[in-house]
Amino acid sequence: MITLRSAPASPYGRKVKICAALLGLGDRIEVVVADTNDPAEALRHQNPLGKIPTLVLEDGSTLYDSRVIVEYLDHLAGGGKIIPRNAAKRFEVLRMQSLADGLCDAALIQVYETRWRAEDRREPKWLDHQAGKVERALAAFEAAPPKLTKQLHVGHV
């Protein structure tokens, strides 16, 4: 069985779980919660960066970064299902993935700034800069939403 190291609050872990469900691979993946703040967490041996999501394959090797994991899952499911093979469509999907990941990055930076930095050391200009990224990314998705070929229902993944 493949193991996905993640945490419930991780948007990147949710992205991987949704892709696994869409690809019909959910029953082949065990989700094991990882505590990225715990220095004794096995995750740090599975992924030198200590980041989630990390996918532990059956042979013990690991893949990390949601983009790499999604590519792997798509390959495992036969390829071309989430990441198209056709170059024009492929790069359109990868561009949207990059925009969505960047939006999540900017949103998380705002969360981490307020969660980890003392209030008197927070930088409002930096927070505003990240908020601008989120606003522009959402506006771009609103202006040109992804084209779905069928109605998707992934339940609670």
Image (spheres, helix red, strand yellow):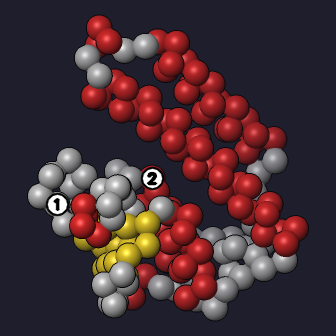
Left or right: where 32 falls relative to 55: left
Residue 147 visible, this orientation: no
| Image spot of residue 47 (x, y percent) | 33, 64
- Tell me which residue sits at (53%, 80%) in the image: 73
Residue placed under numbered mark 2 in the picture: 11
State the mark number for residue 41. 1
- Tell me which residue sits at (49%, 36%) in the image: 107
Image quadrant holding the C terminus, namely bottom left
Element under label 2? Answer: helix
Q: Crowding at label 2, few (<14), some or many (≥20) Cα neighbours within 10 Å?
A: some
Residue 140 visible, this orientation: yes
Tell me if residue 11 comes above or below residue 3 in the rendering. above
Identify the mark nearer the N-term, 2 or 1.
Answer: 2
| Image spot of residue 101 (x, y percent) | 57, 50
| Image spot of residue 87 (x, y percent) | 85, 72
Query: Dots 2 and 1: beta carbons under 8 Å?
Result: no
Inspect the image, locate mark 2, and give the three-letter code of the amino acid beneath it. Answer: Pro
- Tell me which residue sits at (36%, 81%) in the image: 61
Which image quadrant is residue 5 in? bottom left
Left or right: where 79 falls relative to 14: right
